[in-house]
Image (cartoon, rainbow, N blue to C red):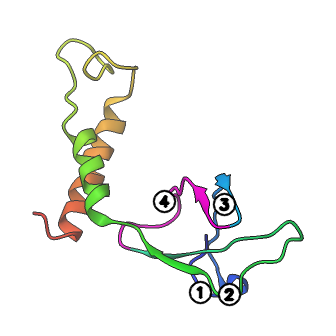
Amino acid sequence: MGNRPVYENSTKLTVALPTAWTDSEITANLRQGIFQPGETAYIFIFDANGTVNETGYEITFDVTSEIRLKHCIRSLEISAGMDGMVDGLNPVSKDCIIRLKDAVHELEKAAGKR
């Protein structure tokens, strides 16, 4: 995936590996990675010879799905007396949780949710 409709003009690129490929359909798990919610990306497909399609297939990453995901993170609470434990899950730092909550707040604000 790239950030421009023409592969050679893209300044941000990330790889998405196909999970299935037939003559009529390609399936892949697209990860947002370097792209921001609401940002447009273009999908490029390389054949066995390394030839890429001239114009990328346009997609836009959904802001609302990102906010739903972030709400799950935001709702985590640090359990009293369990420094670094979040709801009994893997140990994490309190600073990390605070940064995640701040990031959620900024994302919600940018999306007009606050």
Which mark is on residue 5?
1
* Magenta part of the chain: 24-38
| Residue located 21% across and 56% down the image | 105
In the picture of the structure, the residue carrying the numbered disc 3 is 15
Q: CA distance from mark 4 to mark 2?
A: 19 Å
| Residue located 30% across and 54% down the image | 103
For marks 3 and 2 on the same chain, the one whose residue lies earlier in the sequence: 2
Q: Which kind of residue does numbered mark 2 sit on? A: Asn
Q: CA distance from mark 3 to mark 4?
A: 10 Å
User: In the displayed structure, would residue 29 be above or below residue 47?
Assistant: above
For marks 4 and 2 on the same chain, the one whose residue lies earlier in the sequence: 2
Neighbours of disc 3 within 10 Å: few (<14), some (14-19), many (20+): few
Characterize the magenta stretch by its predominant secondary structure.
loop
Image coords of residue 31 (percent x, y): 52, 55
In the picture of the structure, the residue carrying the numbered disc 4 is 32
Q: Which kind of residue does numbered mark 3 sit on? A: Val
Say which of 23 and 29 sits in front.
23
SS state under label 1 = loop
Residue 13 drawn in magenta: no
Which mark is on residue 103?
none
The answer to the question of whether label 1 and label 4 lie on touching residues, with beta carbons closer than 8 A, is: no
The answer to the question of whether label 2 and label 1 lie on touching residues, with beta carbons closer than 8 A, is: yes
Question: From the image, which quarter does the C terminus lie in?
Answer: bottom left
SS state under label 4 = loop
Q: Which kind of residue does numbered mark 4 sit on? A: Gln
Residue 16 quadrant: bottom right
Neighbours of disc 1 within 10 Å: few (<14), some (14-19), many (20+): some
